[in-house]
Image (cartoon, grey):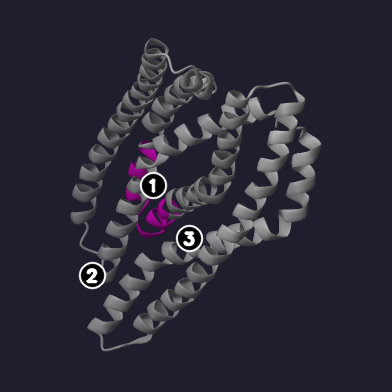
Amino acid sequence: MTQSILTALSRAERLSIAGTYTLTLLENLCMLAYPALTGWAVDGLLKNSYRGLSALIAVWLVHLVMAFGRQRYDTRVFMGLYARLAVLTVAEQRHQGHGTSIVSARVEMMREMVGFFEADVPAMFSQVVTVIGSLVMLFTFDLEAGFIAMAVLLPMALINTWYWRRALRLHRGLNDQIEHEIADIEAARPLRLRRHFGRVRRWHVQLSDSESWTWTVTELATIIALVVLLIDFTRSPVFSAGAIYAVLAYVFDYLQGLDSAPALVNSVARLRDIRARLGH
């Protein structure tokens, strides 16, 4: 598929897609506000005040309405986009002279590409908002906690850079093999089939092993940071009960956001190889 075709379709869908991403961003801002609002509600209730609780309930209800609407809306938007792109992909790949096996594999890759924009891009929004927002809130509550949390970013960046390069190579090999799957199945030769699925298995195992190593290193760094943060934070007597809850919640949100980085790196690496094959 040529770049101009994809650009034309994206332009027609631009407002709809922008609408889904805007709702996703607003949802994540609501979730970012929950720890602070909960802390405010706790402190207020201890003083017989319901203002914080009322604010928490209001934001929660707004979030509920946005999430309900976004989930119904984005499926229709992205599945409609896939239906059009799939037809164009088949026509373009046939025009280039590719056989059924490669065409079928690339239609499936197109589905994954649309799925990336439907599911993985919102996940990236969530991760970025969670990590940056939680870090900013930690600095707001306690400077030392913010700097300790920032220290985790260095080992995480190093290990995920290594994983990015490896995932690109592994996805290239995996997709090369998948493009021959239908031809191997049609041949129906046991030895050829065993060789094909054995290679697919090896590519998947290598991807899984690489992601597990990346996640483990990231998790070890977050465990160390969490221990240091807890020791540092509990030694300070100046925080209220609500502030203690809010800081701990932001710490866990921040670290969980970092934990999801390897899975997103893997998804982006796969998308990059798919885009190269589809000519985007």
- The residue lying toward the viewer, choosing from 36 and 212, is 212
In the rendered image, the vertical position of residue 75 relative to residue 145, given as above or below: below
Q: In this view, which residue lies farthest toward the top? A: 191
Magenta stretch: includes residue 110: no
Q: Residue at x 60, y 38 (%)?
A: 110
Mark 2: few/some/many CA within 10 Å (<14, 14-19, 20+): few
The residue type indicated by label 1 comes to Gly
Mark 1: few/some/many CA within 10 Å (<14, 14-19, 20+): many
Seen in the image, is 150 located left or right of residue 15? left
Q: Are circles 1 and 2 on residues that touch, CB within 8 Å?
A: no
Question: Tag on residue 241?
Answer: 2
Q: Residue at x 49, y 70 (%)?
A: 68
Q: Does dot 3 land on a helix, a strand or a loop? A: helix
Magenta range: 134-151
Seen in the image, is 229 located left or right of residue 271? left
Q: CA distance from mark 2 to mark 3?
A: 25 Å
Residue 156, picture quadrant: top left
Question: Tag on residue 257?
Answer: 1
Question: Tag on residue 28?
Answer: 3
Magenta stretch: includes residue 141: yes
Secondary structure that dominates the magenta span: helix
Question: Tag on residue 247?
Answer: none
Q: CA distance from mark 1 to mark 2?
A: 24 Å
Seen in the image, is 67 located left or right of residue 207? right
Q: CA distance from mark 3 to mark 1?
A: 12 Å
